[in-house]
Image (cartoon, rainbow, N blue to C red):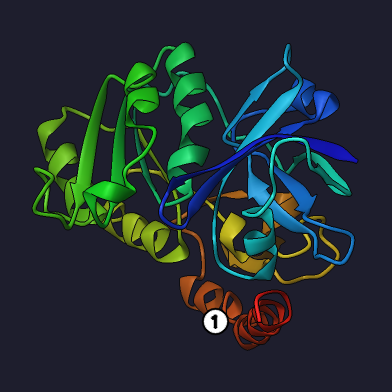
Amino acid sequence: MAKILDRRRLVPNLHLIEVHAPEVAKKSRPGQFVIIMPDERGERIPLSIADWDPEKGSVTSVFLLVGTSTHKLSLLKPGDEVPVYVGPLGKPSEIENFGTVLLAAGCFGIGAIYPLARALKKAGNRVLTIIDVKANYLLYWEDKLKAVSDRVFISARDFALESKDYVPAKIEEVARAETKIDRVVAIGCTYLMYRCSEATKPLGIKTIVSLNPVMVDGTGMCGACRCTAGGQTKFACVDGPDFDGHQLDWDELFKRRKSYFDDEIRSLCYWERTNFP
């Protein structure tokens, strides 16, 4: 059993969860994920690692309320325990001095991009970070990302924020203003990563995306995260989660991520009726 150290809402529909898992904290690297099961009757789900503290023995993730399991996670309190907490899983992100790296993130990806920004900055890169939100009240961890980035930009659709652009337009704007962008990394929902990849393709900038949103089991056994990259069949959980966004079959990914959509809705409706009559 792994103990919950902290669980709180960051912004509407997004929660932070910090778990005491010393062995996982010792080995965690940017880009990896954990598998967590909220209770003994729950399912195992993957969560990107957003931070870790080897001295404290803690691992932090940011998750979006989507289905039954994430709703269960959102009800946990400090001191509660979860029956399964496994990790770190997946291949770590490639960290070296590329030059200037542009990071783009939205939703839960804002948390997941933080350790990557920190590691890339430490490796000597110039780090530019774009945070994408629909509204100002969905913005979080801006200060944390400013601390590990040379510049932070906001893309939003909100009168309260300066930017009114969706993230692909912001990528193009930043790329035009910079002498050279050596690499782009996008983390967030499948659509955001697809749009970022499409925006950078004509610019010829290598773009890495994280395919955590299409995972189910997370250990290569269920096949739900099967994808086509560079014409070859891959599994996002064991061959990734990082892939070249220009080599992915995005049409296949969009179809695959809908595989359990109806089942998840039925599960959530049943759980809510059962527990909140």
Look at mark 1 in the image and give the residue it sits on.
255
Q: Which of 130 and 74 is in front in this view?
A: 74
Numbered circles on residues, count: 1
Quarter of the figure that contains the C terminus? bottom right
Question: Could you say which quadrant of the image residue 273 lies in?
Answer: bottom right
Q: Is residue 23 left or right of residue 74?
A: right
**Residue 56, image x, y percentages:** 72, 16
Residue pictured at 62% horizontal, 54% vertical: 74
Quarter of the figure that contains the N terminus? top right
The answer to whether any part of residue 203 appears in the image is no
Residue pictured at 71% horizontal, 51% vertical: 239
Q: Nearer the viewer, residue 38 or 155?
A: 38
Q: Which of 166 and 180 is in front in this view?
A: 166
Q: Is residue 39 above or below residue 155?
A: below
Dot 1: element: helix
Q: Which of 161 and 270 is in front in this view?
A: 270
